[in-house]
Image (spheres, rainbow, N blue to C red):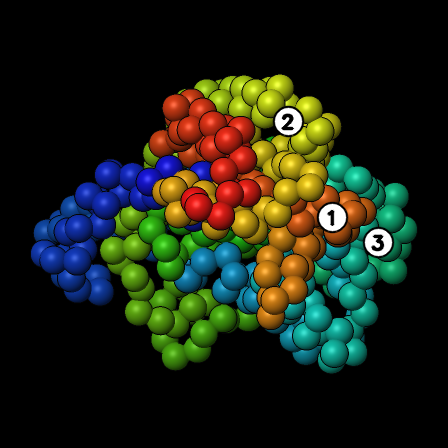
Amino acid sequence: MIYLDNNTTTQPTAEVVEAMQPYLTDCNFNRPPSSASWPGVHDPDGAALAMMSLSGAEGANCFTFTSGATESNNWVFSETTRGRKPGRIIISAIEHASVSEPAAKLARAGFEVVEIPVNDQGLILLGALRAALYSKPILVSIMTANNETGVVQPIERIGLLVRMISPTTYFHTDATQSIGKLNVNLQSDWEDVDLLSFSAHKFHGPKGIGGLYIRQGIELEAMLLGGEQQRGLSSATMNTPALAGLASAAMEAHYPEIDEITNLRDSFEVNLLKEFPNAIIHSKSAPRLPNTSFFSLPGADAGRIAERLADSGIIVGIGAMCSSGAIRESKTLRAMGVPHHIARSSLQISLSRFSSSTQLDTLLDFLKSKCWERDEL
């Protein structure tokens, strides 16, 4: 199989699988009887140290572990507004559903939710954000990088605007697509980020584990009650195998392959445009994740192409979804003003350290053959 949908999930590395195995067998208890007897056993502290190293956080105790970014995002929206009079919440028009749906729930409860629009490249309009901040919102939540286009938002500039105009506002970023792909430093460029969500399975860790960074001095109510785990912030039995996998993935994520992955992506796009001069590469002029290419082949049916690719063992992302027989285009492309007929012809590839030029050549050969148009395939 050729897997080119890594923004959805990544393959755990052999090192991650190896790190998890002892905690499924010999070390199957919740916590070791003593650290001296079981050196190296992973618990929240060990995983937090690995995440601190990866993100430049000021301390390991800034991390609370959850089932992933969706849970973390919901926690942020629930607990930053609990007990407050309804006020303003700011998100972008291209947020993941785990941000936009909690925001919509707050809107139904009387909060004012403002969606900041994006330009035709998918970058949020900073002027609109600036204007919205003067009402002193409770929370600003802007994703770091879009899962479809790969567009990277100017988190440093956004943080500066929040601090300058509304210093008491919480600034949260869903960094699910960024950890392991971008240089994140929470003590320098990102020093104005208060809360940051992440998932291990986006950077070659296991599914079902992630967390929330909470800057020192920020206090949130507990996510789950019933015990003292994780400083009382999440009272649940810890998933120690997954924590071991997350720690291993975080320690490996300082990998040098980013330039190689960027070159693979750029070379693919050059070759794509040679073969399909009318192809549209979305957000090409914006800062993007190094592994992501989101493109349209005008006149093609992306859903049909993706199905035939899957039949041939090639997995890609798609910019339009079929729901109850109707094509529903990407929310992100819609916010960017991309016409429906272009959006429905959009495909996405997202690469990983396991991707190769041979895989991309195979994909391009399939697209060149246009064999998805033939009934006999």
| The C terminus sits in image quarter | top left
- Residue shown at the point (68%, 24%) measured from the top left: 277
Q: Which mark is residue 133?
A: 3
At label 1, which amino acid type do we have? His
Badge 3: residue crowd in 10 Å (few <14, some 14–19, many ≥20)? many
**Residue 278 found in image quarter:** top right
Q: CA distance from mark 1 to mark 3?
A: 35 Å
Nearer the N terminus, badge 3 or badge 2?
Answer: 3
Residue 220 x, y percent position in the rendering? 57, 65
Question: Picture coordinates of residue 170 (x, y %)?
Answer: 69, 57
- Report which residue position mark 1 lands on: 341
- What residue is disc 2 on? 276
Query: Does residue 239 appear in this view?
Result: yes
User: Does residue 74 sit above or below 163 in this rendering?
Assistant: below
**Residue 167 left/right relative to 321:** right
Residue in the foreground of this view, choosing between 46 and 368:
368
Question: Quick one: label 2, few (<14), some, or many (20+) residues within 10 Å?
Answer: some
Q: Amino acid at mark 2?
A: Phe
Mark 3 or 2, which is nearer the eye?
Answer: 2
> Which of the pair 52/179 is nearer the observer?
179
